[in-house]
Image (cartoon, rainbow, N blue to C red):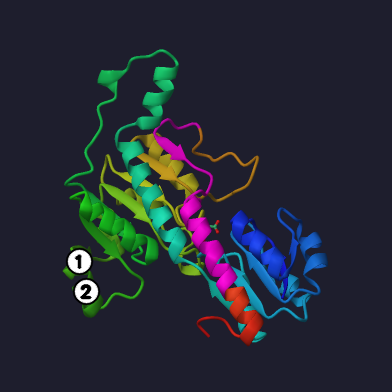
Amino acid sequence: MRILLASPIDTEALAILQQRHDVVSCIGASQEQLRERIRDREILIFRSGVEISGELMAEAPGLRLLIRAGSGLDNIDLDYLRTHGLELQRIPQPGARAVAELAFGLMLALSRQILVADRLLREGVWAKHRLTGHLLTSKQLGIVGLGNIGSLLANMGLAWNMRVTGCVEHPSPERAAAFASQGIQLADLDTVLASADYLSVCVPLKDSTCKLIGREELAMLKPGSYVLNMARGGIIDEAALSEVLRQGSLAGAALDVHQVEGGGAISPLADLPNVVLTPHIGAMTIDSQREIGRRIIGIVDTFAVSGSTPDG
Ligand code: MLT
C-alpha cells in the first residue's frame, strides 16, 4: 500500500510497515508539504496536531483509508470523509488507559503538591508543614463524559474508595442503572459540577463541547475543588479558569491539553503554582503506542489483502 505517515508512531511498527509497504513520512510537515506528498497515497496515518482538511484529502484521488492512531477526531473534516466515501479507522482503547492513569497521577500531584514540594526541596527549602495535602479517598470524583477514558478513570477512583459521579451526552434510565451497578452515579452536568472535589473533563471536542466548562460552570464548582482537562484544549475556557484560580476559589488545576498546543505556546495558566501543565502526553506510554502500532499494522495488512478493514 502507498502510505503517508503524518504523525509519529511506534518505531517497531514503523519499521514493519516500511518493510511491507511504501511509506512516505511527513512528520512535522506544513500543510503545503502534506498536500504535495499525499497526492499518490492510498492510506493516511495521523494523530492530533495535524489538520486533516477536505482540501488536503482532495489532493489525493487514490486515498481510500485514514487511520487515526488514537482517539480524537477534532482535527479531521468528517463531512468530507462521509461525502467522499473514505474509510476511517480509529484506535481509541490503547491510549485511553494511559490517559486515565495520567489523570489519576495529576490528581495525586495536585492533592499532595508534589511538583511544588520537588521544586522547593531543590531550592533547599524544607517546607514539610506548608505541604499538607488532601487524601483522594472518600472524595467526590466528578467526570464529564463516561466513554473509554472517563469509565477507566471512574474505576480507578472507585478502587481508591472515591465516590464517583459522571454525566453523559445521552443519559437514559438503562444507562444510569448500568453505571449504578458499577458504583458510578449518573447525574446531569450541573450536579456533577456542584458535587465534585475533583472534576475531570473526558469528552471529545466538538461544537457542543467547545467551552463546555466556561465562567458560569466554573462558578458552580465547590470552593477548594480541583479541575482537570485530559480531553482537548478549548473544552475548558482557559481564560475563565485562569480568572477563577487567581480569585482563589479553586484549589488547583491540571491540564494535559491546551487551547494552543505546540512549541512556543505559553499557557495563560503557566505562572500559577497550583497548576500542573503537561504537553498532551496522555496517550504517550510505550505500552499504548506499541499496541496502537500493532493495530495499525493489522489494519493496513488486512486492507492490503482484502480491500477492507478488520471491522468493516
Ligand atoms: C488521542 O486523541 O488519541 C490523543 O489525544 C493522542 C494523540 O493523538 O496525540
Question: Label 1 belongs to which residue?
Answer: 182
Count the marks.
2
Residue 204: percent from left, percent from top = 46, 64
> In the image, is the residue at mark 1 within 8 Å of ligand 1 by its beta carbon?
no
Extreme-top residue of the structure: 124
Callout 2: helix, strand or loop?
Answer: helix
174 horizontally vs 311: left or right: left
* Residue depicted at x 67% and y 85%: 84
- Circle 1 — which element? loop
42 relative to 30, above or below: below
Residue 85: x and y, percent? 64, 86
Which residue is disc 2 drawn over? 178
Image quarter in which the N terminus is found? bottom right
Magenta segment: 271-298
> Pointers 1 and 2 in contact (CB under 8 A)?
yes
Q: In the image, is 224 to the left or to the right of 63?
A: left
Residue 274 magenta-drawn?
A: yes
Cα distance in 3D space between marks 1 and 2: 7 Å
Nearer to the camera, 198 or 41: 41
Q: Amino acid at mark 1?
A: Gln
| Image spot of residue 305 (x, y percent) | 64, 83
